[in-house]
Image (spheres, grey):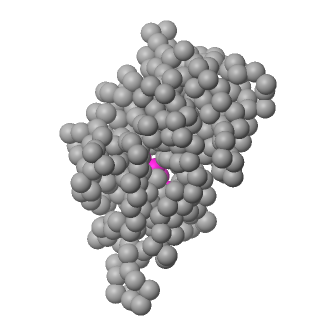
Amino acid sequence: MAECLAFVSQKMSRVRWQPVTSSLQKPDTFVSGSYDDTVNNISVWGVGHMTRTSNQQADNYMDDIESSQPKKLLECQTKGSVAGMEYVDQKSVAVGLSSGTVSLFKYNVEMQSLAMQQMWPTLHSLSGVTDVAAKNPDLVSVGEDGTINMMRVDCKQPLRCMVGVDSSPITSVHMVTSTEVCTTNMAGQLRMYDARSPSDSPSRIMISSETLVGLCSVDHHPTQGHILATGGADGCVVLFDARKECTPVSKLQIHEQDVWELRFHKTSPEHLFTCSQDGTVRRLDTTFDTKTLSSELSGTSPIEVSELLPECGTSINSLDPSGNLLLCSSDAEAIYIIDNAV
């Protein structure tokens, strides 16, 4: 397993690979968003062959990730810290800011352009946006104010504003389908919302534990949409079956501190990646079927945990797997690219 480390002079709250068009394609472009700085930015980076100019030959460059350093291709300032970021399509990125604004940025590396295409200002009060989710052409934002906003990329006004639907600060959001949204909050709840319903009430509330430990992140299994994974402030990965259970089917102590992000691998969903405040990155390997997960409670689960990045001394805030590469960012103002992560 090889690791590429680049120091980027800013703390990065989010990193995302540009979506690939084929499972055989190697990702070579990613975006990052900074936070907690005097001036914050979103940046577009190239890896390997993306860093060469059009009049240079490919065989003069090493595409091997071990010898490739990410190169910043484009940059644009944001009005506030980046708190959430997701690709809408291959060249468009939705960004949630601490100012409460959600913006849509579009870039073109060949034309050297990165610009804001759409903005929904001050959607959230208090500490602003905490996360965004996207499923083209739909967007969702959440905030510490307990509000959920639903937008569409071609509409200047939000389609729906569910103001204060959660009495607890909302920490993350994920779109399971274009009409089904799940959120996590500081009270340890996983909430499901149906965008087709006229009611703002959640269609389902699942509780991670009796002690109400906050949940920080959520993702769903790519091929088994009823399996939802959440990362807790206690370092646990909590797994739910949305079909029938209101309590977890499995709870695993994976980290020592907050699990800031977790993401299933899109084409190899038997792998679940996690990153934490404790400075580590880990991979969970299992079939993630309900029967297997339930056996964890009796101590017989075959779930394997692999250390991909040992403790680096500062929080790992974000990660994103694509192909055999894993992208991570840390509070040490560093970006890691781990090869053969799968």
Is residue 319 rendered magenta in the image? yes
Which of the two residues, 10 or 18, is positioned nearer the viewer here? 10
Residue 233, image quadrant? top left
From this viewpoint, which residue is outermost toward the left?
A: 313
Q: How many marks?
A: 0
Q: Residue furthest top?
A: 210
Magenta region includes residue 200: no
Residue 338 occupies quadrant: bottom left
Q: At 49% across and 27% down in the image, what residue appears?
A: 125
For residue 281, side relative to residue 202 (left or right): left
**Residue 268 in view in this figure:** no
Rendered residue at 79%/25% (across/down): 198
Is residue 155 placed above or below 48 in the rendered structure?
above
Residue at left offset 78%, top offset 27%: 197
Measured as percent of width and height from the top left, residue 32 is found at 40, 53
Q: Quadrant of residue 54?
A: bottom left
* Residue drawn at the location 56% of the way across and 48% of the way down: 119
Pick the front one: 203 or 2? 203
Residue 319 at x, y percent in the picture: 41, 47
Which SS does the magenta portion mostly show? strand
Is the N terminus in the top left, top right, bottom left or bottom right quadrant?
bottom left
> Does 23 sit above or below residue 148?
below
Of residues 330 and 197, the one drawn nearer to the viewer in this rendering: 197
Residue 113 in view (yes/no)? yes
- In the rendered image, residue 317, in percent from the top left (x then y), is placed at 36, 41
Q: Which residues are magenta?
A: 318-322
Q: Name the quadrant of the C terminus.
A: bottom left
Q: Vertically, is 94 above or below 339?
A: above
